[in-house]
Image (tube, rainbow, N blue to C red):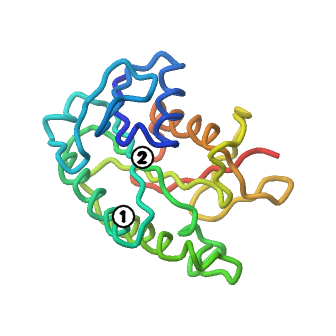
């Protein structure tokens, strides 16, 4: 299986590469600068410069793009649209490192995590931008995408426990009532989905077992 990880030098991307390499998968790091990952194969290119020809040999493309400043937040939508456009009509699966703010907190799927009174104002613009990108992604019936939302507390430096609970569109809590996962455990779930391909054109979510 050939996997490309876009924005592989980021915190999430680097751990996803590490997890995939540890399983003996054929991994290419797609980076703008020097490769800082464990991948032996490297494609040095900006996401927006990628072409259909660049990605045609891959079974799975993992999008670990991130943007946090007010000026760059719209790139969540435009970057995802670009990747969908160049993968349109192909068998290559697109897996996206998503956000937790758009997870639903009621059975009717009318209220999201980001709508809650305890959701920090500072993160609302990011949650809104990522929710918009997800909404647009749902319209892409021409792409074999899977959007993977982390738990509410997404810990960059958290430990790798090797255990996670797979959820769906709603915020899932573990047996301790926590919504938490480390980047390392999230990477396990991401690579599991890359290998198994069980949730095409669906959003799934992951939380660490208690």
- Toward the viewer: 171 or 73? 73
102 with respect to 179 (left or right): left
Task: Assess disc 2: are there few (<14), some (14-19) or many (≥20) residues with their C-alpha within 10 Å of its C-alpha.
Answer: many
Q: Distance between the residues labelled 2 and 1?
A: 18 Å
- Toward the viewer: 205 or 38? 38
The secondary element bearing badge 1 is classed as loop
Task: Assess disc 1: are there few (<14), some (14-19) or many (≥20) residues with their C-alpha within 10 Å of its C-alpha.
Answer: some
Q: Name the residue at the front extreme.
A: 34
At 64% across and 76% down in the image, what residue appears? 120
At 78% across and 53% down in the image, what residue appears? 174
Q: Where is residue 96 in the image (x, y as percent from the top left)?
A: 42, 50
At 51% across and 27% down in the image, what residue appears? 18
Task: First in sequence, mark 2 or 1: give its number.
Answer: 2
Q: Position of residue 86 (x, y in %)?
A: 18, 48
Q: Where is residue 101 in the image (x, y as percent from the top left)?
A: 56, 68
At 71% across and 78% down in the image, what residue appears? 118
Which image quadrant: the N terminus? top left
Q: Can you identify the residue that label 1 sits on? A: 138
The secondary element bearing badge 2 is classed as loop
Picture layout, residue 171 above or below residue 18: below
Picture layout, residue 66 above or below residue 22: below
Numbered tag placed on residue 75 in the rendering: none
Q: Where is residue 109 in the image (x, y as percent from the top left)?
A: 57, 76
Picture layout, residue 171 above or below residue 85: below
Picture layout, residue 134 above or below residue 36: below
44 with respect to 8 (left or right): left
Q: In which quarter of the image is residue 30?
A: top left
Q: Can you identify the residue that label 2 sits on? A: 64
Q: Name the residue at the right extreme.
A: 176
- Toward the viewer: 164 or 42? 42
């Amino acid at each position: 299986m050939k996997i490309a990880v876009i924005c592989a030098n980021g915190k999430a991307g680097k751990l996803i590469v590490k997890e995939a390499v540890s399983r003996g998968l054929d991994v290419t790091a797609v980076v703008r600068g020097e490769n800082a990952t464990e991948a032996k194969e490297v494609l040095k290119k900006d996401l927006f410069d990628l072409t259909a020809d660049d990605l045609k040999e891959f079974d799975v493309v993992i999008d670990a793009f991130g943007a946090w400043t007010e000026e760059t937040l719209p790139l969540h939508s435009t970057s995802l649209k670009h990747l969908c456009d160049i993968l349109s009509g192909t068998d290559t699966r697109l897996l996206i490192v998503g956000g937790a703010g758009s997870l639903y907190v009621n059975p009717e799927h009318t209220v999201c995590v980001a709508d809650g009174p305890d959701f920090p104002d500072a993160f609302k613009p990011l949650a809104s931008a990522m929710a918009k990108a997800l909404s647009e992604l749902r319209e892409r019936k021409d792409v074999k995408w899977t959007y993977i939302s982390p738990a509410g507390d997404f810990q960059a430096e958290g430990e790798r426990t090797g255990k996670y609970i797979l959820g769906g569109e709603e915020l899932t809590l573990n047996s301790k009532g926590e919504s938490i996962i480390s980047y390392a455990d999230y990477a396990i779930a991401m690579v599991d989905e890359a290998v198994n391909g069980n949730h095409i054109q669906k959003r799934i979510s992951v939380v660490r077992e208690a």
